[in-house]
């Protein structure tokens, strides 16, 4: 257990320190974004996901050291496959932040990032546990359809429910914490080695991304959150329970799909300290909450989503693993 605490702490510390160092550089080189939910704000550094990936990398490298020299047990092949997948998504996000990759390409490339996971899982089980149904053998469909689509969907969903100070990292921390609890319940050290460092890295980032944000995650940060959840549950073989942890992201997807995935006006209009849907039109889940609450501050909006994600996590634990917990 102490090894996992070390992974968490090192990832948190390294993520925070890297971000503190690169913020001035990003501002100096005009790698900035506008905080659209505020009337007036100074330019905010972008691509904070670089710090997240850096902290995550240190944590996983430390885990590999523990595995090699101190006997921390996990499947190295599975962890390496997950790493390649996550780093591929980080690279896609990095390029998109700099060059603005077309959405069609950004949606397709994560399918290729799943290849390492397909390779390592090809000799494993194709059985998934479904709530109220039981175990279902998906056969070859699992390898060539479910895994690549799972990576692509998860990474793109966490890239969509974003844009408010602290929401990406805050929800990601809660979601991955519950995924870690699931990994512990099913005995998947492989998934824990992926999840724990990412939680630490996200927390280090959150200190600088909380309202008022000093840095934004960029696509390099948002894509890796979903990729990490998906990669971990695939190597840990608890895909169905992890999928339900993304319920809020799925709701946001359908609301935005109904509005043809708006590229603008998805944020809030600030009036007297509260955010309201622009033109009183709901284009995403966040704007739905703004409308239902008749205006809400950005901090309360983010805390609402973090709290709702926590409730989703509790429900998932009891639906899937209630007999083990009780």
Image: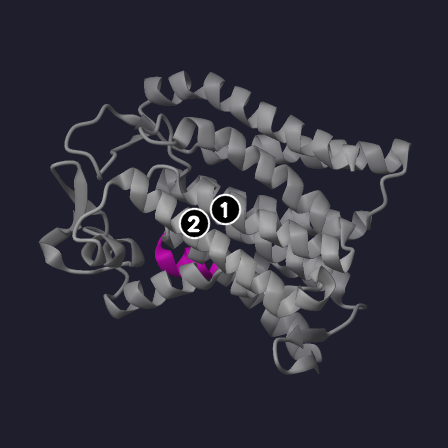
Q: Is residue 94 toward the left or the right of residue 15 in the image? A: left
Q: Is residue 207 toward the left or the right of residue 103 in the image? A: right
Q: Can residue 300 be spotted in the picture?
A: yes
Q: Which residue is mark 1?
A: 172
Examine the structure image and report whether residue 109 is included in the region drawn in magenta: yes
Disc on the earlier residue, 2 or 1: 1
Q: Can residue 116 be spotted in the picture?
A: no
For the N terminus, the image quarter is top right
Examine the structure image and report whether residue 148 is included in the region drawn in magenta: no
> Is 148 placed above or below 20 here?
below
Main SS category, magenta section: helix
The residue drawn where x is 82% and y is 48% is: 74
Quadrant of residue 222 within the rendered picture = top left
Q: Are marks 2 and 1 in contact (CB under 8 Å)?
A: no
Task: Indicate the position of residue 68 as horizontal and vertical percent values.
Answer: 87, 35
Q: Which mark identifies residue 307?
A: 2
Total marks shown come to 2
Q: 285 or 138, which is in the foreground? A: 285
Q: Which residues are magenta?
A: 102-110
Task: Indicate the position of residue 315 as horizontal and vertical percent values.
Answer: 54, 63
The residue drawn where x is 35% and y is 44% is: 302
The residue drawn where x is 25% and y is 34% is: 35
């Amino acid at each position: 257990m102490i090894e996992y605490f070390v992974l968490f702490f090192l990832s948190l510390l390294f993520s925070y320190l890297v971000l503190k160092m690169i913020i001035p550089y990003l501002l100096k080189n005009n790698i900035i974004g506008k905080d659209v939910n505020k009337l007036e704000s100074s330019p905010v550094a972008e691509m904070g996901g670089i710090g997240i990936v850096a902290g995550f990398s240190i944590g996983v490298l430390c885990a590999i050291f523990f595995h090699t020299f101190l006997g921390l047990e996990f499947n190295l092949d599975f962890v390496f496959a997950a790493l390649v997948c996550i780093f591929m998504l980080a690279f896609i996000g990095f390029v998109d932040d700099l060059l603005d990759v077309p959405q069609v390409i950004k949606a397709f490339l994560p399918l290729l990032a799943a290849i390492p996971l397909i390779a390592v899982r090809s000799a494993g089980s194709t059985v998934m546990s479904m709530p109220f149904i039981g175990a279902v053998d998906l056969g070859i469909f699992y390898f060539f359809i479910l895994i690549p689509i799972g990576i692509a969907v998860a990474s793109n969903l966490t890239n969509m429910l974003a844009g408010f100070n602290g929401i990406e990292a805050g929800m990601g921390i809660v979601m991955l914490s519950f995924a870690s609890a699931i990994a512990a319940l099913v005995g998947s050290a492989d998934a824990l080695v992926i999840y724990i460092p990412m939680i630490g890295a996200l927390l280090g980032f959150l200190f600088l991304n909380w309202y008022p944000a000093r840095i934004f995650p960029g696509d390099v940060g948002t894509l890796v959150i979903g990729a990490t959840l998906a990669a971990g549950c695939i190597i840990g073989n608890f895909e169905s329970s992890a999928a339900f942890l993304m319920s809020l992201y799925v709701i946001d997807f359908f609301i935005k799909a109904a509005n043809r995935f708006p590229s603008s006006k998805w944020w809030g209009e600030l009036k007297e300290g509260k955010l309201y849907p622009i033109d009183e039109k709901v284009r995403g889940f966040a704007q739905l909450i703004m409308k239902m609450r008749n205006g809400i501050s950005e901090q309360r909006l983010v805390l609402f989503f973090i709290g709702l994600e926590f409730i989703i996590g509790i429900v998932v634990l009891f639906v899937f693993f209630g007999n083990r917990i009780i």
